[in-house]
Amino acid sequence: MLTRENFQFARQAGATHIVAHLVDYFRGGRSNPRDNQPTGDDCGWGLAGEPDRLWTTEELTELKRAVEAEGLKLEAIENFDPAHWHDVLLDGPKKRQQLDGIKRIIRSLGEAGIPIMGYNFSIAGVCGRTTGPYARGGAISVGMEGPVDTPMPNGMVWNMIYDANAPEGTVPPVSTQQLWDRFGEFLDEVVPVAESAGVRLALHPDDPPMPSMRGQPRLVYQPDLYQSVIDRHPGRANCLEFCLGSIAEMTQGDVYEAVDRYSRQNRIAYVHFRNVKGKVPYYRETFVDDGDIDMIRVLRILKRNGYDGVLIPDHTPQMTCAAPWHAGMAYAMGYMKAALQAIEAGE
Ligand SMILES: [Mn+2]
């Protein structure tokens, strides 16, 4: 989707910045149409990328140049490719080599002048969700209809296949402590590199925010656990990719308190500005004006606390027309521009 036409579309919809995904979530996937956010089935979204082909400074610089040519800024790259870090997540034999590769990618972002790297430290990844006419007017949207504990097959992590020839069997479950140990080691290795490269790391919370998915523990499935992420490493590059939808889906806490708490600490690198109805394990993604979150109240809190980062629509329901994804995004962007104008005017 990183085309000149889509950059122009974003600019026309009022965007000032782009957050780009370089992972192809759909490659070889089944029940995973490319015209929506990926959902997939028990076999995940699709095949991970090339393990030996790290994103280079040259290609990142070229992407930045293409974005800037349309009057936008490239604010962040979102998500590592499972091919580049599966053994970091799984504590496998290639972990050392893959940590070095991740550091190389972070340095390349810095060299290209891209200030943020968004990521999701998760074994099972964004999984177990369904698609249906869940949103207003029967718009196709994404939701959750109960817990999903089917074990992950060998060769899968982060809801993608990194080894199609893995032996039969399933990935053994690990403890929550083991997951936090792996995450802590990742931060200890990568945060100092990010700081010297001038890049902030931004952690997405679990989507869906269940304590476990597919038999694997999750890292940030309640708002308080974001504080544990910050406290685990004091480096200023250790930041949050603040997903309002995922936070509202959590069973504890309060989304407004969470916005206040983490924006006060100046740890929000950017915001996923989307809305939902319900909480795990039963929720549905909605149009931005039609969910449980008072989005205007969120903006007021962010303004009061001096937040000056980027907001992106993340994902939206698909609108019934010739361009369902674009129409959904344009609707969210129009809402966001009007809300920001009203907030700026002090209303
Ligand atoms: Mn999100």
Image (cartoon, rainbow, N blue to C red):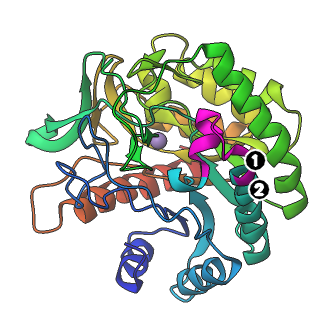
Give, as a three-letter code, the residue at label 1: Arg
Q: Position of residue 343 (x, y in %)?
A: 55, 47
Figure disc tally: 2
> Does the stretch in magenta take in 194?
no
Question: Which of the numbered marks, if any, corresponds to residue 221?
Answer: none
Q: Could you tell whether 39 is left or right of 33 in the image?
A: right
21 or 270: nearer the viewer: 21
Residue indicated by mark 1: 96
Q: Position of residue 122 (x, y in %)?
A: 54, 34
What's the residue at 72%, 68% (across, down)?
A: 109
What residue range appears in magenta?
85-97
280 or 126: nearer the viewer: 126
Q: Could you tell whether 143 is left or right of 19 in the image?
A: left
Q: Position of residue 61 (x, y in %)?
A: 66, 82
Question: Which of the numbered marks, if any, corresponds to residue 100?
Answer: 2
Q: Which image quadrant: the N terminus?
A: bottom left
Q: Are marks 2 and 1 in contact (CB under 8 Å)?
A: yes
